[in-house]
Structures are given as structure tokens and as C-alpha cells.
Image (spheres, grey):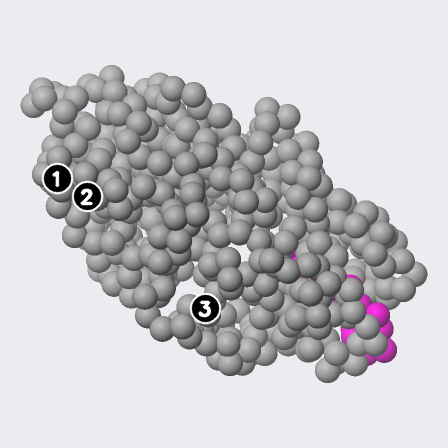
Amino acid sequence: MCGIVGVVSSAPVNQLLYDALLLLQHRGQDAAGIVTQLNRKFFMHKAKGMVRDVFRTRNMRSLPGNCGLGQVRYPTAGNAFSDEEAQPFYVNAPFGIVLVHNGNLTNAQALKAELFSSDHRHINTESDSEVLLNVLAHEIEKTTRGLPLRPRDVFEAVRKVHLRIKGSYAVIAMIAGHGVLAFRDPFGIRPLCLGRADGTVLLASESVALEGTSHKFERNIEPGEAVFIDLQGTVHAQQCAEHPVLNPCIFEFVYLARPDSVMDGISVYQARLNLGESLAKRVISTVPPNEIDVVIPIPESSRPSAAQLAQLLGLPYREGFVKNRYVGRTFIMPGQSVRKKSVRQKLNVIASEFRGRNVLLVDDSIVRGTTSREIVQMARDAGARKVYMASAAPPVRYPNVYGIDMPTAEELVAHNRTVEQIREIIGCDALIYQDVDGMKKAIGSLNPRIKGFDASCFDGVYVTGDITADDIARLNASRVGADENAEDNSRLALPNHED
């Protein structure tokens, strides 16, 4: 999962790109990069780390120009520890193209071989984004045939790209001397939107990056659609897919996106309130409300769901955990023992909210169960009589292949286990999960135009229709650190997640 941004403006864009990336930092903390264009020349700086650490004053001064791209990266494949894997990626022909990408190509290995044997293009990293860039460059080269570039040529190239690549992708590319191109996969799995301010057109993964930089949200990029913004700021758009259908990733609404974003017509905050309402009905059928003294969220994404659940059940809502924002994230910690220690460093209990009470802990989702087990024990150590746990999302039973580096199936606590077996592993007195249909209805009701979601990590249905068991095995093998040692594989690969 990554955050991407692109801009064409009548003014210098380096500060705007930086500010937009800060607003998208939650989508990736591994690396950051910005590229700008001045007089057909690209100026780029990228490195591992958070936005504030990657870009210093001297770096910002070396990024002149009135159009550019940026990305914050959370890796799903390749070498997480190599600066070469950071985006943007660059290719010099045709014209000169730089690209940022959010998503995951499920046929990247086949494309890589095809690019070498048929297209005579070399891929120098393990990143599927470099593969995507070279496919796009090859199709633009074929379409233009050495002639000047026109918007219709760009759209024809994107049409060919859609036919060649599979998986999820939201893409922003900059073509030297011509403008900025953006397009989205035919299922709209990964988000992308467009906004404006005086003299500026801005593209971003989430609406919060528009609003936080004083741009007015205009619209989402449609599934399969391509948008080309020339250097004068004129927006050209065309549908480039044969059978587009909107099936956004439901995990964006459950956890990944910021609550103040609106994605594909759905308020993320309202979606999480609705999940809490649906979850309240599940709680009632498992634990009588009169046996619960207090509802406590596990920071931070679960707060809207927990608050709504508490209100509907007529129970007190309390903050029982304080989060230390200055401790390394648990998902990058190698090994279970290190992660366990990090949980205690990152979360501290307010003992008075637990002592002598039956508490209902609410989390946004449970992936491995490692942190959930530790948090349940922390509640007991603080004096809780009983500890119930509720998840605003259904059991995560299947790997994600569309850009979220979910653990392999064997590492998922819910894989091939009953709820009772999961409860025993976590150690709580009762475990309540959201159900898949309830989740889809809770979120889908906010935009009737959306007829379906990619909910593959919950229901095992991969909306692109091309995923086999062999594909999942291959993608698992390419996971970050998968070819290292077993202890490295124990790290959680969900950005900014507690579990």
C-alpha cells in the first residue's frame, strides 16, 4: 500500500508535493520520493524513511518546476531495505517518463519476462512498479511511432496497458515536456481522486491530501479511466477499459484510509460508524450488555466503531490505552519476542479504567492475533475481571494480492480456525467478529452505486478473477523478507497497525 500524488500548476510545486505527502504519510512509512520537471528536465530525490526525514531544505531547493509527482511507500514485494525500490521510477524513452504507483500487479513476473524477450526492455529492480512503467513506456512508444504526443495517443497507450497488466493499480506518470497522466485499474481497487485550486490541478490517493492543501475535491478517477493534464492545466479524460466496474478495496474503509477522507463517495468516518452499529448487533447475540461495564477502543482506527457501539448499547465509552507515538512501529519488529516488548512500549493502560470491570475491547481488525493476545493480557494485569474482544472487521482468513502485504495464510490467526479456537489463542473471555455480509452492507449502503467490493482477505473472492492457488504461493514467496529467515517472516506487514 502506498500514497501517491501528482500536480500541474502555474507556480512551483515542491512545497505542495511535500505537504500532500505528509497528509498521505499513513499510507506508507518505508520510503518517500518527489520528482519535479523544469524545461523538460526531471529533478528527483527519494530515500528510505518518513517524509520529514527524507526531505531537508537543500533537497527541496533542488526540486524546481511547476509540475511533479510524489509517493510514500509501504513495500509489498521486493527489497524493503533498498533505496532503489523507492519511487518514483524513471525511464528515458520515449520522451522521458517518471511514474508512481499504488497497488500490486499479479502478473508482474510474466510481464518482466515478456518485456525482456519481446519488448527488449530491462528491469533492474524487483518492483512491479518498474515493470508497469516499462509496459506504459513501450505502449506509448508504439502508439506515437516517433510522432509528437497527443492526448488521444496517451489514452490509446493506457488502453493497451489495461489489456496487458493484471491486479490493482492507481498510477500517476509525468511525461517530459507534455504533462501528467493518471489512470486506475478497471476494478477501481486502489483509490485516486482529482481536485483543483487557482491555477493548480492535484491528483492524490485520498481526498484529505486535497483538502489539507486547500484544493477543492472535484471527483474520483473512475475505474479504467485515464486523465491527462497538459502543462497548461487542461484536463483531458477518457474511459480506456472495456468493462470497468467499481469494486474498491473494503479494507481501505475498515482500516487503511484516514477517517477524514471520502473515497468513491463514501465517508471513511461514517463507514466506521456504520461498522460499529453492525458490530453492536453481533455483540448483543454473544454477550448481554448488562455483563459489560465499559467499552474501550484499541487506538486508533477503531475509535469511531467503538464509540458508535457503546452508544447503541448504552454503555460507557472510555479511553483505556495511551499510545506512545515515538516508538518504532510493531510491524517492522523482527520476531515475536521483540514485537511483544514493542507493544508494551507503544501502549500503556490507564489501570483505573480496567480495575474490577468487565471490559469490551474493540479493534478495527485482527490479523495475526499476536498483539491482541498481548493487549488482553495487559487488561488482565490492570485488574479487569473479564476481557471481551470485538473486531469491527470479519476474520482475516486469506492473503491479499492487491497491494496490502498481508501475511501468508498460515500466519493469519483466523486461517482454518473457528472463532472459539481464535478466542483461546487470544485469551479473551469472549470474541465477537463482524460478519462479511454485515460489513459489506454497512459500508455499501453509503453509496448505492457501488455494487461490490474487493473483500478478498475476508471472503477469499479475488475480484479480478485471475488468481489461482499457484499465484498466491508465488506472491507469498515474493513478500518482503520471505526469502530471509522464518523470524523475519513473523513481522506484521500492515502499515500503522497495532496487531
Q: Which residue: 19% across, 28% down?
A: 139
Nearest to the observer: residue 165 or residue 153: 165
Using the rendered view, name the quadrant where residue 169 is placed.
Answer: top left
Counting residues from the N terminus, which is met first, the one under dot 3 or under dot 2? 2
Numbered tag placed on residue 113 in the rendering: 2
Residue extent of the magenta highlight? 351-364
Q: Residue furthest left?
A: 146
Using the rendered view, name the quadrant where residue 379 is placed.
Answer: bottom right
Q: Do the residues labelled 1 and 2 touch (CB within 8 Å)?
A: yes
Vertical order, 435 against 428 (above or below): above
Query: x, y percentage for residue 466?
Result: 41, 36
Numbered tag placed on residue 117 in the rendering: 1
Mark 3 or 2, closer to the camera: 2
* Residue matched to label 3: 491
Asked whether residue 267 is drawn in magenta, I would say no
Query: x, y percentage for residue 130?
Result: 23, 46
